[in-house]
Amino acid sequence: MHSRGTGSWGSKATVGWLLAAAALALSACHPTAPHRAVGAPPAVLPTGSVPEPTLLPGGEPPTGSLITHGPRDRPRIALTFDADMTRAVYAALRTGRARTSYDPSIVDELRATHTPATIFLTGLWTQSYPDVVRSMAADPLFEIANHSVDHAAWKPPCFRLTPVASTAAKRAEVRDAAAEIQSVSGISPRYFRFPGGCAGPNDVKLVASEGEQPVGWDATSGDAFQSDPRAVVANVLRQTQPGSIIVMHLMGPPNAPATSRALVQILPGLRQRGFQFVTLSALLDPSPGGPPSSTGVSSEAP
């Protein structure tokens, strides 16, 4: 399951909302991070405006296939974090029912250990945490990528996420999130990850036609709603191999309550096995060794 996982809430009524949010794979609160106000909806590109395709590390445009791993002939791996936010969580942040949907200790640990990572941002998360996004975008350790506007499902059923209504709405999920990320960070995202990893071949091609490369993973941490960090550590250490793309989550409790505690064991554990952490772009760059064809691609989402 690729979904998200206790914090301070104001009333018993809100507890009911929390349970519903968990069922929808939503993100909620971490007691140490500050509450931030949120503003207007994400920007919308003019009708008919198609963004210029962003070139991949080897100079090629995005492909109509889903990348799930990098070259297997070198010990590089990419650690990736999804920053999910649905419209329900966005509303809860605005009304004060949730304090935050961000665990800063994850980014602190990455910086303390000089560990590169690629962060897949939803548009609503970007809008809710502009200072965090700008800080990460300015840090050479981090690469910023696109995770849709509001974490809706492209191919339902998908962990009870609200479905995207139409093909036009899917294009808007890519464009509007990219516009919000670019507006806040100054960066046009190169990569796109489907919410929940749920997508079909036509969805993969649609994203590529919007100028972004669809990316999945081959090593799942299982940190969604997992309270035991040992389970998360075991998942990552067992699945990671040369070229792996590892997926974790940035929100913290209740949707990813063990991520930060697991991370402090995962990083040294993988380094002891000889793996080198790099950003997604560095992982997929064909120049250090191996042609682009050595990159794992699939026409289906994981």
Image (spheres, helix red, strand yellow):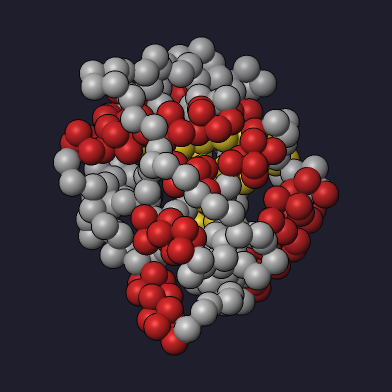
Residue 124, compared with residue 31, is above or below; it is above
Residue extending furthest toward the right = 112
**Where is residue 63, by image quadrant?**
top left
Is 92 on the left-hand or right-hand side of 72?
left
User: What residue is at 49 percent from the left and 60 percent from the top?
Assistant: 93
Residue extending furthest toward the bottom = 12
Place of residue 239 in the rendered image (x, y in percent of width and height, measured from the top left): 56, 56
Q: In this figure, what is the number of numbered marks?
A: 0
Place of residue 189 in the rendered image (x, y in percent of width and height, measured from the top left): 50, 29
Residue extending furthest toward the left = 166
Residue 96, compared with residue 137, is above or below; it is below
Place of residue 38 in the rendered image (x, y in percent of width and height, measured from the top left): 50, 49
Of residues 187 and 180, which is closer to you in this image?
A: 180
Place of residue 280 in the rendered image (x, y in percent of width and height, measured from the top left): 58, 34
Of residues 113 and 183, which is closer to you in this image?
A: 183
Is 146 on the left-hand or right-hand side of 252?
left
User: What residue is at 56 percent from the left and 25 percent from the top?
Assistant: 187
Of residues 252 and 289, which is closer to you in this image?
A: 252
Of residues 206 and 167, which is closer to you in this image?
A: 167
**Where is residue 52, by image quadrant?**
top left
Q: Is residue 137 visible?
A: yes
Q: Is residue 197 visible?
A: no
User: What residue is at 51 percent from the left and 57 percent from the top?
Assistant: 220
User: What residue is at 38 percent from the left and 75 percent from the top?
Assistant: 17
Is 45 on the left-hand or right-hand side of 84?
left
Quadrant showing the N terminus: bottom left
